[in-house]
Image (spheres, coloured by chain):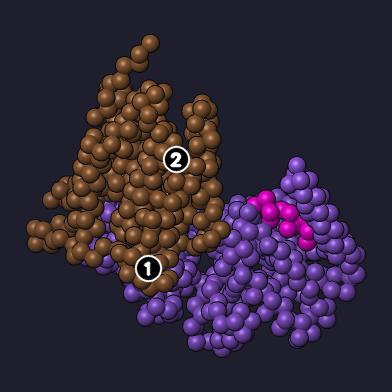
Chain colours: A brown, B purple
Amino acid sequence: MSFISYVIRGISLGSVYSIIALGYTMVYGIAKMLNFAHGDVIMIGGFIIFTIMSTMGLNPLIAVIVAIILCTLLGITIERIAYKPLRKAPSLAVLITAIGVSYFLQNFALLIFGADTKSFTSVINVPDLKLAGGNLTIAGETLVTIPLCIIIMIALTTFVKKSKTGRGMVAVSEDRDAAILMGVNVNRTIAITFAIGSALAAVASALMFSSYPSLSSASGAMPGIKAFVAAVFGGIGSIPGAMIGGILLGIIEILGRAYISSQLADAIVFFVLILVLLIKPTGILGKQIQEKV
Amino acid sequence: MKMKRMLGLFLVLCLTVASFAACGTKEDTGAQKSGDKFYIGAIGPLTGGAAVYGQHVKYGAEIAVKEINEAGGINGKQIELRYEDDEHDPEKSVNAYNNLKDWGMQILMGAVTSGPSVAVAEETKNDNMFQLTPSGSAPAVIQYDNAFQVCFTDPNQGAASAKYISDQNLASKVAVIYDGSDVYSSGIYEKFIEEAANTNLEIVAAEAFTADSKSDFSVQLQKAKDGGAELVFLPIYYQEATLILTQANGMGFDPIFFGCDGLDGILGVENFDPALAEDVMLLTPFAADAPDQKTQDFVDKFKELSGGDIPNQFGADAYDAIYIIKAAIEKAGVTPDMSISEIGDALKVAMTEITYDGLTGAGMTWAATGEVNKEPRAVIIKDGVYTLFE
């Protein structure tokens, strides 16, 4: 019985990783850059929701919508200021810039919101599901997060495959120069990618902080890295892969903590990652892309 | 072009202002001190993440200094206190120390937090300056013979907790959740386990977490619950404790939660539901609602000075620290015209000879190592306030 309950907790934790990983993988898949600031956009989203809901006392739904709008604007602004001027620069330069943006956002939040940890009120008002006479509990947050993850995953896949903008994204990701020749506006496409990624970050922040209600300027960093691992695990660039990677990562982390060592849980997660990458370097659902010479 | 020139001008202006500002402080602190007063320096965070601790220390120390000065000082000599901000940053605390020395400091009360206290201890050792930290609890703070603590050394809180839980018969089956990546938490944990072996406590689960995975505590709580723990010992900081309490509540797990001074502050977390912290116990040397006259006088004066804040243990530690310095000075017969090193030598002997009754414990004595020996007390959270546990 306790095994099942650990698996359920693993899925809860994993669903949070999944929803963050979706944003990571989206941006990587299209813009071919690792947006290390993604976790910190989530943190900012958390503070926006917290401020609107707890300080101003408005409806959670309004808070989430405002957070989505503001995070989208933030994502576009970051892209415009920090990444767009480096479009022709080596990818290492962009990576370092992303780390810089991440630190900037953390310190900015520290300055504005202070260093005190804040307790986040859940935006989700769904009762916990009790099974097996109360021995198994599935949190209401998880009951919302998983379906929402699946909906977002399907919506994103459909958007990328079917819509004109989405196909433009695929074109940009596959061959940027050819896409320009075909009349795709690369800058606009990448900006839209960032907008979607950041909107997803706002949704992720609502779900993550509802499940784990401790909010401080560093709250986004570690989940961001774990979600990045989840995205690599599932095959970075693959939207369903991010979802699967996230859930698996959560389950491995919880089971590792429960049955091997609570101190070594993270080491176990990363060990499994190394194994997966050794056996299947592109991740679980990653596509093998041949470099054309 | 014009923009550039404007910018240049602006920068030059900034520099000029900055250099003037630097001049100002230099003149201020460079003054020679005469031997008519005791100059006590204090260091602690007034801004930044740990500001609440430093702020309380400042108020607590000011109250004690005012009381002593009004009552005629120490052996007829007044005390002058100067407080420098270190932002809970070891490097800045050393700067603060140097500023205070320029000002004429003879005795240091500080620093408030462990990291800066350790950094400053290196400096005080070189100068053989007497250092008494109100609340820097890491063992390294008192590694040299000139440094003493008012609070318990971290690991000793573990031993004191185990003894307290067992003596008070709070529980027999105990689980521990601690931060394996933090020296404060794992230090307390180790001493707790060590001491628990000498008591009737049975450790049913000892689960760690790390700084990198401190949001999901479901496994640790599940193990404590499966082990039948009646009490969960949390030698951690309050930030993580809020999550543990929230998640335990979600699981319907309701043991006694017992922590150390790291939990002090849990009620101050913005938007945290205090009902979740109901009946949480913590080992802390000071409870603001203790009925004795001494505590109540202090709380009243503290509220007046701070504009309504209830003092936490840091304020009380600092208040005691100033009186302990006074007791040691009187014992050693130190006078303000002695050199820093002479004062240091005299006080470190006197510290081992005095017995002090203060807000944070009765019959406090010190070993030559700098460790304090006092009876631990516990408070319990009732209706959202810390109440003395009896």
Question: As shown in the figure, which amino acid type bears the numbered disc 2?
Answer: Phe
Decide which of B88, B378 is in the foreground and name it.
B88
Give the class, few, some or many, for how many residues have Cα within 10 Å of label 1's Cα (few <14, many ≥20). Answer: many
Mark closest to the chain's N terminus, 1 or 2: 2
Residue A144, percent from left and from top: 21, 56
* Residue A160 appears left or right of B186: left
* Residue B379 appears left or right of A256: right
Q: Secondary structure beneath disc 2? A: loop
Q: Which span of residues is magenta-colored?
A: B90-101
Task: Please check the rendered image and state whether residue B95 is part of the magenta-colored stretch, yes or no.
Answer: yes
Residue at horizontal 32%, vertical 53%?
A: A203
Give the class, few, some or many, for how many residues have Cα within 10 Å of label 2's Cα (few <14, many ≥20). Answer: many
- From the image, tell me which residue sits under label 2: A36
The subunit letter for the residue under badge 2 reads A
Residue A288, percent from left and from top: 28, 21
Residue at horizontal 40%, vertical 31%?
A: A32
- From the image, tell me which residue sits under label 1: A53
> Is the C terminus of chain B in the top left, top right, bottom left or bottom right quadrant?
bottom left
Please tell me whether the stretch drawn in magenta is mainly helix, strand or loop: helix
Determine the CA span between mark 1 and mark 2: 27 Å
Residue at horizontal 77%, vertical 82%?
A: B69
Residue B126 appears in view: no
Residue at horizontal 30%, vertical 55%?
A: A207
| Residue extending farthest front | A183
Q: Secondary structure beneath disc 1? A: helix
Question: As shown in the figure, which amino acid type bears the numbered disc 1?
Answer: Met
Residue A171, percent from left and from top: 33, 28
Residue A155, percent from left and from top: 23, 44
Splitting the image into 4 quarters, where does residue A56 fall? bottom left
Splitting the image into 4 quarters, where does residue B45 fall? bottom right
Task: Please check the rendered image and state whether residue A84 is part of the magenta-colored stretch, yes or no.
Answer: no
